[in-house]
Image (tube, rainbow, N blue to C red):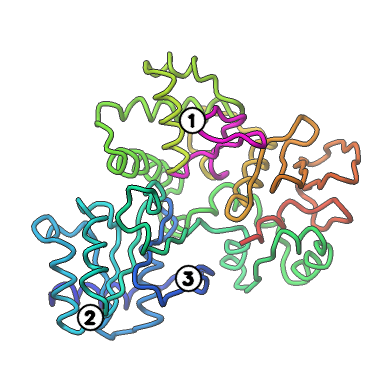
C-alpha cells in the first residue's frame, strides 16, 4: 500500500493543470460513486489528480490508483478498497477502470460494502454506465469531460478568464458579449490554431501534435472500442479502414452498401462499427429530425476539426471544418439535426442555422441564424462563428 501512497504523492505534487476545467464545479461531489467519461486524450487523468490536489493536498484519506498497475492482475478492486478504507481511506480515485475485468460488478460490491468510501473513476466514452445491464446504473452519477472548448483554449493562450455563455445568451446578446471579449483579445488571431490543434490538451506537450493525435486515434480503436466492445483483434483493420473511408469521403451520408463491400462485411456490421466510432468520439452522426440510430445517418462528420487534419491524403474544405466546429461546439448540451440545403442545421428541433465561410452570399432570412466565419462582431441574426466556442 505504501508504494501506492508514494506514487499518489508524486503525481499530485507534479500535477499542474493548464486550465481549470468547469466540470470540477459542475460535479456533485457528495455522491459516493462518480464516473467521469471522456474520449482518450482530453485530460481525465489530470482532472482526477487536480481534484485530489485541490480538495485533499497530501491528506492520505484520498488515493489515486491506475488499473494499468500489474498489481491488479492478481488482486481485485474490492480487496484493495477494503484495505484502503481500513487505513482510514475515504476517497478512492480509480483511473481507466474499464481495464479491470469485472469492474462493473466490483464497483457495485464496493458501493454496497463500504458506505464510508467514495469512489471516483474515469472511463472511456465508449462505456455504457447507465444501460439496463449495468450493475451500477442505479447508484452511479455519470459526467462527461470534453476536450478544450475554444473559450478554454483562448483562456490558456491569453491568460484571460472568460466564462461560458448559454446558447440563448449568445443569440440574444452576442454583440455585447463580443465587444466585451474584443476589448481584451482578438479571438480570430487564435481561432485557426484551435481548429487545427486546440481540442486536445496534449498539444501542450513538446511532441509532434499530428503524430500524437494519430497515436491517440489508433488507441481509441484498439483499446476503447475493441476492449470494451469485446471485438476480436482480427476485425481491427476493418474498423480502421472504415474510419479512413468515412474521413476521406467528407461530411455526407454514408453509402453503407459500398462501405460493406469495401471492408468486406455486412451492412449491419458497418452500422454497428459506425456507432462504435461515434461512441469513441471519433465521428458524429447527424440525423434528420425524428430519426436516430439504428437508422442510417444523414451525415457523418469527424467529431472535432482537429481529427480532420492528420488523415492523409485528404483535401479539407473550409466549409466542412467550420461545420464540424459548430456541431462539436453545440453537441455537449444541444441536439443538432440535419436541415436542408439552405439551412443545413436545426438545433433543438426549432432553431435553423447556416454556417457561412468568408465571402459567402447570404440570401437573408430573418428566421435563420447565420454563423459567420472571420467576423469579429455580428449584428441581429448574424453571429460570429467563434462565439459558439464559448458554449462551455
If you read the primary sequence from the N terminus, does the residue marked by circle 3 or circle 1 appear first? 3
Query: Is residue 135 toward the left or the right of residue 325 in the image?
Result: left
Eye-nearest disc, 3 or 1: 3
Taking depth in this image into account, of 338 and 49 the one nearest to the observer is 338
Does 294 appear in magenta? Answer: yes
Quadrant that contains the N terminus: bottom left
Circle 3 residue: 27
Count residues near mark 1 (Cα–Cα under 10 Å), then give few for <14, some for 14-19, many for 20+: few
Circle 2 residue: 89
Task: Classify mark 2: helix, strand or loop.
Answer: loop
Query: Which portion, as a residue range, is magenta?
Result: 280-305
Q: CA distance from mark 3 to mark 2?
A: 21 Å
Write the residue at 27% across / 72% down: 92
Q: CA distance from mark 1 to mark 2?
A: 49 Å
Write the residue at 24% across / 31% down: 232
User: Residue 250's x, y, as percent?
Assistant: 59, 29
User: Residue 300's x, y, as percent?
Assistant: 57, 32
Q: CA distance from mark 3 to mark 1?
A: 39 Å
Count residues near mark 2 (Cα–Cα under 10 Å), then give few for <14, some for 14-19, many for 20+: some
Q: Check residue 208 in the rendering and tell me which mark sits there, or answer none.
A: none
Query: Is residue 389 toward the left or the right of residue 145 in the image?
Result: right
Circle 1 residue: 312
280 in relation to 375, above or below:
above
Q: Are marks 3 and 2 in contact (CB under 8 Å)?
A: no
Write the residue at 65% across / 67% down: 164
Eye-nearest disc, 1 or 2: 2
User: Residue 372's x, y, as percent?
Assistant: 79, 47
Amino acid at each position: 500500500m505504501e508504494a501506492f501512497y508514494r506514487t499518489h504523492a508524486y503525481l499530485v505534487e507534479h500535477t499542474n493543470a493548464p486550465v481549470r476545467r468547469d466540470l470540477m464545479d459542475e460535479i456533485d461531489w457528495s455522491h459516493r460513486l462518480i464516473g467521469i467519461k471522456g474520449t482518450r486524450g482530453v485530460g481525465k487523468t489530470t482532472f482526477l489528480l487536480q481534484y485530489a490536489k485541490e480538495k485533499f493536498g497530501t491528506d492520505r484519506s484520498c488515493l489515486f490508483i491506475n488499473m494499468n498497475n500489474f498489481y491488479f492482475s492478481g488482486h481485485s478492486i474490492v480487496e484493495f478498497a477494503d484495505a484502503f478504507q481500513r487505513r482510514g481511506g475515504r476517497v478512492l480515485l480509480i483511473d481507466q477502470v474499464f481495464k479491470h475485468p469485472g469492474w462493473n460488478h466490483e464497483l457495485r460490491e464496493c458501493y454496497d460494502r463500504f458506505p464510508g468510501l467514495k469512489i471516483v473513476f474515469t472511463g472511456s466514452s465508449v462505456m455504457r454506465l447507465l444501460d439496463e445491464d449495468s450493475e451500477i446504473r442505479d447508484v452511479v452519477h455519470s459526467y462527461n469531460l470534453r476536450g478544450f472548448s475554444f473559450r478554454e483554449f483562448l483562456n490558456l493562450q491569453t491568460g484571460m478568464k472568460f466564462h461560458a455563455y448559454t446558447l440563448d445568451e449568445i443569440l440574444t446578446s452576442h454583440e455585447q458579449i463580443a465587444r466585451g471579449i474584443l476589448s481584451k483579445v482578438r479571438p480570430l488571431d487564435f481561432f485557426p490554431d484551435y481548429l487545427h490543434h486546440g481540442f486536445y490538451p496534449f498539444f501542450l506537450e513538446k511532441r509532434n501534435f499530428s503524430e500524437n493525435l494519430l497515436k491517440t486515434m489508433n488507441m481509441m480503436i484498439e483499446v476503447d472500442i475493441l476492449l470494451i466492445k469485446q471485438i476480436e483483434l482480427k476485425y481491427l483493420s476493418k474498423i480502421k479502414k472504415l474510419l479512413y473511408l468515412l474521413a476521406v469521403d467528407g461530411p455526407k451520408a454514408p453509402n453503407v452498401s459500398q462501405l460493406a463491400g469495401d471492408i468486406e462485411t455486412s451492412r449491419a456490421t458497418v452500422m454497428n462499427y459506425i456507432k462504435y466510432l461515434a461512441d469513441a468520439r471519433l465521428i458524429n452522426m447527424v440525423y434528420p429530425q425524428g430519426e436516430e440510430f439504428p437508422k442510417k445517418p444523414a451525415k457523418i462528420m469527424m467529431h472535432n476539426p482537429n481529427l480532420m487534419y492528420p488523415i492523409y491524403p485528404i483535401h479539407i474544405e473550409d466549409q466542412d471544418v467550420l461545420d464540424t466546429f459548430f456541431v462539436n461546439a453545440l453537441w455537449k448540451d444541444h441536439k443538432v439535426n440535419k436541415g436542408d440545403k439552405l439551412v443545413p442545421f436545426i438545433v433543438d428541433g426549432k432553431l435553423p442555422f447556416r454556417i457561412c465561410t468568408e465571402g459567402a452570399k447570404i440570401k437573408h432570412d430573418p428566421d435563420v441564424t447565420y454563423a459567420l466565419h472571420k467576423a469579429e462582431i455580428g449584428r441581429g441574426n448574424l453571429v460570429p462563428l467563434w462565439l459558439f466556442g464559448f458554449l462551455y
